[in-house]
Amino acid sequence: MVIGSNLIFYNELPSTNTEASLLLKTGEQTEGTVIHTDFQSAGKGQAGNKWESEKGKNLLFSVILYPQSISPYDQFLISMTISLGICDFLDRLCTGARIKWPNDIYLGNGKIAGILIENSILGTMIETSVAGIGLNINQDNFASILPRPVSLKMATGKEYSISACLLELLSDLDRRYKHLLYGDRNLIKHDYLARLYRFMEWSSFSSAGSVFTGRIKDVLISGQIRIEEKGGLTREFSFKEFSYLS
């Protein structure tokens, strides 16, 4: 087992990703080291967003990886891999898990998990990768309205053991990560697109102040999303360059 080979627990942290980065600065850590906590006082999301989580109710952790066989251009494969591992875990407990590009996991139209991948690139390789994950397990009351947060408990009506969920999820992430390193990477992308929220569905989007109708056709391993407009024009977007409207 790579992911989960070393577990480091803190009662509270500002951010598990920040702690993982600090540990890496002190020297090389065992690959697959997991830093997990009951509460983050400054949990980080994509593009500076905050992650809301009630103390002791959810999974909050980061994984240290050394995916040096993945080129910087292909780095979104890491996000695809982590996303699929989370969906594999959710499949055993509920139905309807989908990946909302670039880094959210949804149940129906509610967000159940967020991912923050922070890569350190050295020349032509990814030297280290810190994969931060927040997964809502037992929380059933959220202060924020958007983006419609949901938890496993809200979806199933059941209470779960946080520690058992962590070990099961780490096993799923480990299996997917080994596939990334040693398996067919085309299959990773295939599985990712099969899970993609609103893939090939006509939807409304907004970009640069204008609204358009389109459908998601592809996600590149470099991270961009490809959307075909109603008129036939195909455009590529990077993070924060468009938003979903309906």
Image (cartoon, helix red, strand yellow):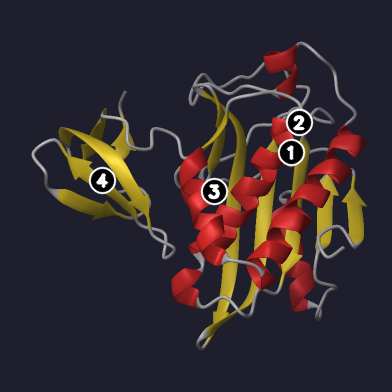
Q: Residues within 10 Å of mark 1 (few under 14, many from 20)?
A: some
Quadrant of residue 134 in the image?
A: top right
Q: What's the CA distance linking mark 3 and mark 4?
A: 19 Å
107 versus 6 height, above or below: above
Give the residue type that dot 4 points to.
Ile
Q: What element carries label 3?
A: helix
Residue bearing mark 2: 92
Find numbered disc 2 in the image and state the secondary structure of the residue it sits on: loop
> Which residue appears at 21% of the width and 44% of the height?
228
Residue that mark 4 sits on:
227
Query: Percent position (x, y) of residue 184?
Result: 59, 66
Give yes or no for contact between labels 2 and 1 (Cβ–Cβ under 8 Å): yes
When the figure is inspected, residue 15 is found, relative to residue 40, above or below; the finding is below
Reading the image, the residue beneath label 3 is 191
In x, y percent, where is residue 180? 64, 65
Q: Compared to 209, does 140 lie above or below?
A: above
